[in-house]
Image (tube, grey):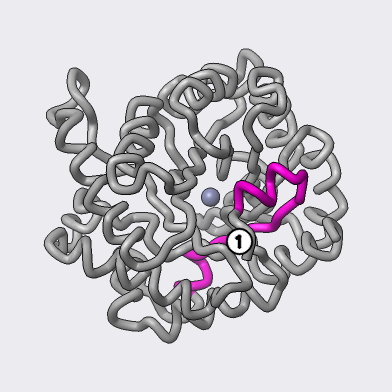
Amino acid sequence: MKPLLERLAKGDILLCDGGMGTMLQQRGLVPGTCPELWCVEQPDDVMAIHAEYRDAGSDMVECNSFGGTRYKLEHYGIADRCHEINVAAAKIARRIAGDSQYVLGTMGPTGAMLEPYGDETEADVLGAFTEQAEGLVSGGADVVIIETMTALEEALLALRAVRVVDVKMPCIVSMTFDPVATGGYATMMGVRPKAFAEACLEARADVIATNCGTGIDDMAAIVEEMGAVTKGQVPLMAMPNAGMPVMENGRTVFQETPEQMANKVGILLDAGARIIGGCCGTSPAHIAALRAAIG
Ligand SMILES: [Zn+2]
């Protein structure tokens, strides 16, 4: 398998996989319990989900490690199992990926508030990401993806942590943008796509990405804004939700069908995205439809 960055430099378009949370719940994960612990306690279920996405045609598999920092694991009283859980997450993803898919070690927000807004120091958060990255790298991840970030400082700390662990590890940095009433898009913490892309260029992220928050229509505009900054210097990635969420009987649902997403994926490619994946509300059926559309 050619290294991911070589494929992207050649101009290849690659397909990532889709949502994990709903898939775990369909297999019995009780909301409020730790999804990442399944990598250790119910690896067969996690592997079955990875296999469904692989069989749907994705080129890469995202580990079930999104909430795998000690900050998140602490909510379940298992912070001391951080290394074990992240190693397992990467190992079982590799077992399904073999050498036909890239294994993406996933790192999500810690939920910790950095000084001066909160009590956590940079060193604390850097340490937590470093610990997680060590687990993912020693478990065999090919790439690390830092995703669903809303604070720029935290995203950049996570990137620094990955570099501390393995300076050559390709690193994707992804933030979540929402539409702003006054126009354009921003993260919950007020970061605009252009400012994010500028910071990523400076910090030498290997791929600059956006995930969650919006569906394809809005995400194409976000990718265009980032592309106006990067001007082709760094590949862009987009992982839209299956449309914007709507409330149904008190539950958040995403309504775009696989066909609807597949019909629109061209606008994301035209906007400049070179890796496409799916976030909330996407399933193996969505990824299969995207595969057929992208070719
Ligand atoms: Zn999402």
Q: Is residue 260 above or below residue 186?
A: below
Residue 115 image point, x, y percent: 18, 22
Residue at position x 48%, y 53% from top?
A: 143
Give the labeled residue for mark 1: 18
Query: In front: 92, or 74?
Result: 92
Location of residue 253 (image quadrant):
bottom right
Residue range of the region highlighted in magenta in the rendering:
4-25
Specify whether residue 5 is painted magenta.
yes
**Foreground residue among 130 and 181:** 130
Image side of residue 126 versus residue 213, left or right = left
Horizontal side of 163 relative to 70 (left or right) equals: right
Does 288 appear in magenta? no
- Total marks shown come to 1
Left/right of residue 189 with respect to residue 221 in the rendered view? left
Q: Residue 209 at what x, y percent from top left?
A: 58, 38
Residue extending furthest toward the bottom = 44
Classify residue 188 by image quadrant: top left
Badge 1 amino acid: Gly
Instruction: Name the residue: 42% across, 45% down.
Output: 168
Element on which disc 1 rests: loop
